[in-house]
Image: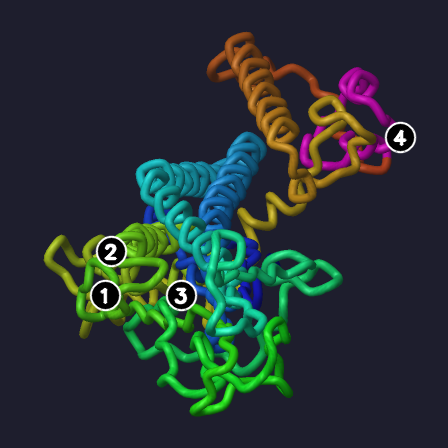
Amino acid sequence: MTSSNVQYGRAATRVKVTRNPQALILIFALTAMPAATALHPKRPAVTTSCHAAYYLEDIAKNAQALISKAIDSAEKATAKAAKFLAVTSTETGAKALTAKLLAVSLLTSAGEVLNSVQTKAAVINAGTIAAAQLEGQILAVAELSATEIESTNFFTTANAYTDSTNLQAKPKLTPNRHGTCKKADGTDEDHTGSHAQNEQGTNKLVLIGLKARDVPPPAADGELTLCAAAGTDGQKYGAYNGCSSGANTVLALKGGRIFDKATITLTRKTAAGDSKYSESSEAPAIPNKKTIAAAAAIAKLEDAAATINGLSTSLDLKTLLTATRLKEQLAKAIDGETAKCADATKTKVDNLLKEVIGENGDEIKNTVGKSVDELTPPKAAVGGDGGRKLSQITSPQEIADATTYYAVRRFIKEQEEKKKDQASPSCPTNAEKPAEGPKKTADECKKHTNEKTCKDEKGCDIDDKKPEGERC
């Protein structure tokens, strides 16, 4: 079945962190943004068993989407962290440290999300199964709701009956030939109308079940009634050949539906801390109270969903840097462990944030985030033509390859510089200083399109951050 009117959101980001050492404490506070995954779908009011089945199926689907979304957010945070680690090997000083702290914080946040999913997985699966099982019951209800007893032919009241002539009540099923709750084209039956609005702080499940039909009062031609007429034996009961009051010549059983619709409304006041849904007030009905008790697993699923939604990793640092929780942490970092983000301390916090993200937050798009956006790994690192920017690479293996490449190149460069330092006198005089050739201009060096010829020409250096063929 097709889910209806369920929307999901995700924010994309770029990052800026100032070189101000004070601002580095901001990176430790990477917290999570609530995800937009809604467990309960936005649907019109439930008035049929098919509507109820669609609603329950949406809950089951959304529960699984919740896990997928959480894992997806953790994967994106991990990929972003790996890219920041690559930046740490191409930058120095505050920018390198900032990138490293961002990477650690993102990995921590991603780990919290994955740990939460793992911890809540059993509850989510149980709730998903409960919703699916209730859906199955309601789909059966949809097919059985039209079950009826067929009307019989008239028979003479004075006959002596034998095993072959005794009157029988014949049940009649009318299954949907297109499939349960389906139209001829295989899509769901329509569920239209304005979205039903639940009371604030209340979750609601509406199930459309079955209960035994209340038999109509006995009357000539009343459904599910044995009645008489002044006709002849063997005539078929019908609209123009029915029973009449006071007749006694022939009898017939007037058929009709045997079930009535049972609307079962379950509520859970989350604002009041209810741990489970209310019990069914329909007794006896199908699904029965014991079966409906499975909704308790859906209540636990709702709680688990709220927990995971609250942990889903965000990459939007501007939002994170202005969060209330972060401001309270900044207050303690600035004025001590008992400080609150109020009065004079609040002014200090606001000034620090303004310095980091600017008056309206636009400055956050530069520096470290810009380094990630502009870094172009060579083909030696990620293959291809060496023209893809790090921000465009999505393969975890290629991101890891780029990070490894820059880390190794950084190590080699540091080792070479260390050897040069060891080979040179600690305090050479002007007379002792080796003669160095003039530094070449960019135009003189750019003719070299590979590293070997670039290194062979004195005065030219390799810039790993530039695209392939333009690094000299």
Question: Do callouts 1 and 4 mark residues in contact (Cβ within 8 Å)?
Answer: no
Q: Which mark is residue 329?
A: 2
Question: Do callouts 2 and 4 mark residues in contact (Cβ within 8 Å)?
Answer: no
Name the residue that disc number 1 marks. Answer: 278
8 and 54: which is toward the camera: 54
Left or right: 78, with 442 as reference point: left
Residue at 24% x, 70% y is: 281
Q: Residue furthest top?
A: 423
Q: Which mark is residue 447?
A: 4
Q: Which mark is residue 209?
A: 3
Left or right: 126, with 334 as reference point: right
User: Is label 2 in a helix, a strand or a loop?
Assistant: helix
Q: Is residue 460 visible?
A: no
Residue at 29% x, 72% y is: 202
Q: Position of residue 345 (x, y in %)?
A: 20, 67
Indicate the amino acid at tag 2.
Gln
The relative height of residue 339 versus residue 84 in the rendered view (above or below) is below
What is the distance, in whole Å, between disc 1 and disc 4 at their CAs? Answer: 78 Å
400 and 73: which is toward the camera: 73
What is the distance, in whole Å, between disc 3 and disc 2 at their CAs? Answer: 53 Å
54 and 140: which is toward the camera: 140
